[in-house]
Image (spheres, rainbow, N blue to C red):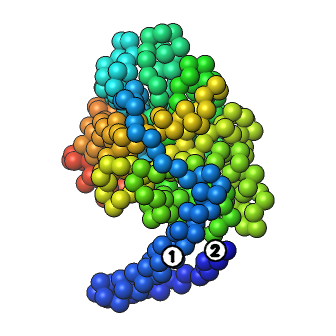
Amino acid sequence: MIEEEPWEEVPLEPTQLPLVLTEVSLREARKAVSKIKYVLEIAQEFRNILEKEGMLGSLPVADGVLDCIAIDSDFTYPPLELVAGRLFIAIRACVFWGSSFCKDKPRVLSEALVRFLRDSVEERTTILLAKRFERQLANELLEAKARGEANFEALLIDGEIIPRVPLIYRSAFEAKVSRGLIDELRTMIELASDTKTYIIGIIKRVQGRDLSIITGVKLPFNDKAVGTLILRSGEYISIGKVHEIIKKASEGEVKPSRRWLKRIVEKVPEIGEVGVFLFKTRNFTLYDIATKIEAYIPQGLSTGDFIKVLAKLARLTGQTGVPHPTDLADRICSIRGDIIGSIHQKLISDAVKEMGDISGVIRALGLINPEKLYPYEYRAWRIRPRHQ
């Protein structure tokens, strides 16, 4: 039986900067190596557990190209902090791949959302707002498919399918945004089921340890790291469905917090059927990295059907460990500093025209911390002080 790895308390010890490259680097490298060695030593035993549970498999040869649409978004985080409020900017993009299409939409689409918000709006609320903006595009495409105006087999979303909605709302605005996001999620799942469309969430920044929860083996790294170390090219792990992960998490000795996940499943029960997978493409990737995804498989389609789609997805996955269409969408929707600066300048210009008073507008809409001016590639407005 695999022994659980001991966990240590981390002391906060300051170090003189010149020693970082000598003493501290070596100390931290040794800590990392001890964890890496542990995973590699138990790799074969852990693979045996996965095989016994039917979780480990080999991807078939991809049969054709995956007709899909990749959606991504980027947003100001934190929003641009102005004296009288916050300037929030979000950009969403989609890329059509294979023979996918949508009537009246170009092969590559990029759209923006700009909002002037109160300074009391919390940063986590703007994340939810960006996710809702992204899900609206997904639903527009699914609705077009339902009308026969679009064709695609899968919709690729950057990040988790299931958004992390807060358990306690801190403002009426946050409650409104959160409920709207849940409504968009519910609609997306219904449309995906009606149109027989796979929804696949490409999880880049993995923090979850679902493998530990499902197998009962305490592992020192997140799922993506473990998959990278133990998987071979062309293999995949079917970790399980969300409702199974929630159930196992509540039964284990160590009960990780899954309250936010339970809440979403209570509101949208179909989300419990979302499956969690790891795979390693046969293509070259930097660091031989594995990929973690969530997948909603429409009713009437089996996990076996999805594995064929997964093989096509793995074929599209390149050196970043991310499917190429998702990489393209990510590049298109990136918010550069000069874009933020241009929008801020235009906001000031339009406000001046609307008010007819440059002095008051500049004072209210200037940066609350002018030290943060440099990333936005423009000069600050200069206002002479009023004489008393």
Q: Give the left or right position of residue 10, taking residue 96 as reference.
A: right
Label 1, label 2: how many angstroms apart (C-alpha)? Answer: 10 Å
Kindly give the residue lying farthest to the right in the view shown: 251
Q: Give the left or right position of residue 68, taking residue 259 as reference.
A: left
SS for dot 2: loop
Q: Give the left or right position of residue 346, taking residue 195 as reference.
A: left
Q: Which residue is mark 2?
A: 2
Q: Which of disc 2 and disc 1 is earlier in sequence?
A: 2
SS for dot 1: helix
Residue 246, visible in the rendered structure: yes
Q: Nearer the viewer, residue 200 or 361?
A: 200
- Residue drawn 65% across the image and 77% down it: 3
Q: Which mark is residue 41?
A: 1
- Residue drawn 47% across the image and 86% down it: 13
- Residue drawn 53% across the image and 25% down it: 197
Residue 212 vertical placement versus 388 (above, below): below
Mark 2 Cα shell of 10 Å, populated few (<14), some (14-19), many (≥20): few
Q: Nearer the viewer, residue 279 or 144?
A: 279
Which kind of residue does numbered mark 2 sit on?
Ile
- Residue drawn 60% across the image and 42% down it: 275
Which kind of residue does numbered mark 1 sit on?
Glu
